[in-house]
Image: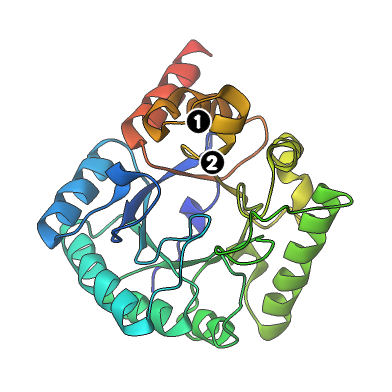
Amino acid sequence: MADWRPIIKCRDNGFPRIMGVINITPDSFFKESRSNSLEKISEKAIMMAENGADWIDVGGESTRPGASEVRLEEEMNRVSGAIGIIRDELPNIGISIDTRKSQVALSALKYGADMVNDISSLSDPEMKNVILENNCPICIMHMKGLPGNMQNDPTYGDVIQEVKQDLKDVSEELIQAGVDKRKIINDPGIGFGKLLKHNLKLLSAGREIISDDAMPLMWGVSRKKMFEDLLGRDEIKNRLAGTLGVAAMAREKKVDILRVHDVSEHYDLYRTMYALE
């Protein structure tokens, strides 16, 4: 497996890497991110790559608030062929598998994925062995509760310190098992068991949530409910401007990877910001 460290850290100019989202699910919260055929998946992946994506994140299970868990076999069937065709079409792009299940992650890596995006931060005890055996990066995300109940009145004393400690605990477990800390990406989990006030504090904190600066930072804020709470944009189609507002702050907050639905808009934003400098 290739050493993907050069593209899990931000660009030399400080701007984040762009990770495009492809959901192979019937119920992901943003309809435009869903793909239900290999032909559409291939077309979308190629377009994302042409529009500036460094990574493509493939998921076969919706983890929106209130979502139910997908059976192992179904999730595996959804993502394996998709990853295979993306790898065939785009041999040089980074592919991430968004899953909580070690068996899905292992299958995806065999089909050509390069990284595991585990929103549950090792809820499957075998996940760490999959990471070790494949020597691949892993993104660990903070989530309070499960997708089915995470937004049921989440509370924190100090959200920044609690998120930082939880991510530190998982990171140390991986490091002690033998995973290179430079391949452990930290994600504060915006919208996963957090209210608007928690999300804003975590975004403002930036890299404060990371216990070791060698570890990369990823944000996933694209079109999330926080923009309904913040801006009154109840329709998901109207949340792009708010999303780009957060993206414009990402370099200042030293974000390494930004997970987005709208690749070309983010790429254009960063090209313009860089040109103006």
**Residue drawn at (89%, 51%) of the image:** 157
**Residue drawn at (31%, 84%) of the image:** 73
Q: Can residue 28 be seen in the rendering of this structure? A: yes
Q: Looking at the picture, which amino acid does disc 2 mark?
A: Val
Q: Which residue is mark 2?
A: 221
Q: Judging from the image, what secondary structure is the residue with disc 2 in?
A: loop
Q: Position of residue 26 (x, y in %)?
A: 28, 59
**Image quarter hosting the N terminus:** bottom left
The furthest residue to the top: 276
**Residue drawn at (57%, 23%) of the image:** 231
Is label 2 in contact with label 1 (beta carbons under 8 Å)? Answer: yes
Using residue 104 as the reference point, say whether residue 173 is left or right of it.
right
Using residue 60 as the reference point, say whether residue 228 is left or right of it.
right
Q: Position of residue 9 (x, y in %)?
A: 55, 49
Using residue 76 as the reference point, say whether residue 166 is left or right of it.
right
Res. 243 mark:
1
**Residue drawn at (49%, 26%) of the image:** 233
Q: Nearer the viewer, residue 118 or 16?
A: 118
Q: Looking at the picture, which amino acid does disc 1 mark?
A: Thr
Asked if 42 appears above or below 88 in the picture, the reply is: above
Q: Position of residue 275 (x, y in %)?
A: 45, 15
Which is nearer the N-term, disc 2 or disc 1?
Answer: 2
Q: Position of residue 182 (x, y in %)?
A: 63, 63
